[in-house]
Amino acid sequence: MKKIFLLPIVAMLFLASACEKEDSLDPLPVKDAGQYVRLDITNKVFAHDHMDATVFGGELTTPGNKVQKYELFVRRTNSNGIVVGNYVQLLTVESFPAELSITPQMIATALGINVADMAQGEVYRFLGYSYGFDGQVINYNNLSATVKAQAGMKQGYKFMTTSVLDDYFPSHTIDGVFGYDNYQL
């Protein structure tokens, strides 16, 4: 009778020791928050009818707190899909979290054009670079395929916006409730 009673106890001890994690056999790397910049876009597009009062942007954060500086570049693509010029530096952020508010005037100044030259339907593409405290530079090409492909990751390295007419894209949707996907590439 004692053997029958002891057998379940021995089996439980054996199973409990078998469930311990053996670090040397774990194929997954140690997770590190990394040097990542996240952009939660809340103002998705410019209201072309109100270029003097509209903004594009959202909250810029660094979840791992390993970013010293963030640089953002912009270039313009006309409504026919033709790239009009190279990327030029738009701004630098050195304090996080930050509210990223980009106005048409900021883009026009960086591109060397007038706001009046910004046509409805043009696309403004952005490239971001993060600089770590260790000197490492991260850009869109350093991101994993999963992060690049999932808009929900809200990566702050490659995104875009456009300007639309209020009649086409009502003002209540400009704040990001519906419509435009800034991470489509």
Image (cartoon, rainbow, N blue to C red):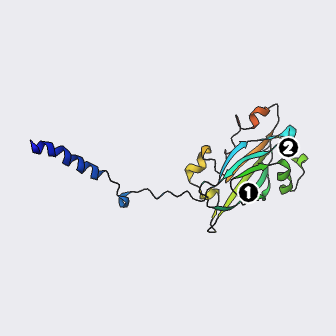
* Label located before the other in sequence (1 or 2): 1
Q: Is residue 50 visible?
A: yes
- Residue 8 in the figure: left or right of residue 165: left
Q: Name the residue that disc number 1 marks.
A: 72
The quarter holding residue 131 reads bottom right
Q: Between tags 1 and 2, which lies in front? A: 1
* Residue most extreme to the left: 1
To which quarter of the image does residue 95 belong? bottom right
State the image coordinates of residue 114 (x, y, percent, origin top left).
90, 51
> Residue 154: image x %, image y %?
63, 47
Lateral position of residue 52 relative to residue 23, left or right: right
Residue flagged by tag 2: what amino acid is it?
Answer: Ala
The numbered mark at residue 119 is 2
Q: Residue at x 81, y 46 (%)?
A: 78
Q: Is residue 169 visible?
A: no
Dot 1 and dot 2 residues touching (CB under 8 Å): no
Identify the residue shown where x is 69% and y is 51%. 60
Which is nearer the eye, 168 or 82? 168
- C-alpha distance separating marks 1 and 2: 22 Å
Q: Secondary structure at mark 1?
A: strand
Return the x and y of residue 13 as percentages of the image width and height: 24, 50
Amino acid type of the residue tagged 1 in the rendering? Leu
User: In the shown orientation, is residue 126 left or right of residue 108?
Assistant: left
In which quarter of the view is residue 86 placed?
Answer: bottom right
Please tell me which residue is depicted at 59% across the width and 55% down the height of the picture: 143
Quadrant for the N terminus, please. top left
**Residue 89 position in % (x across, y down):** 78, 59
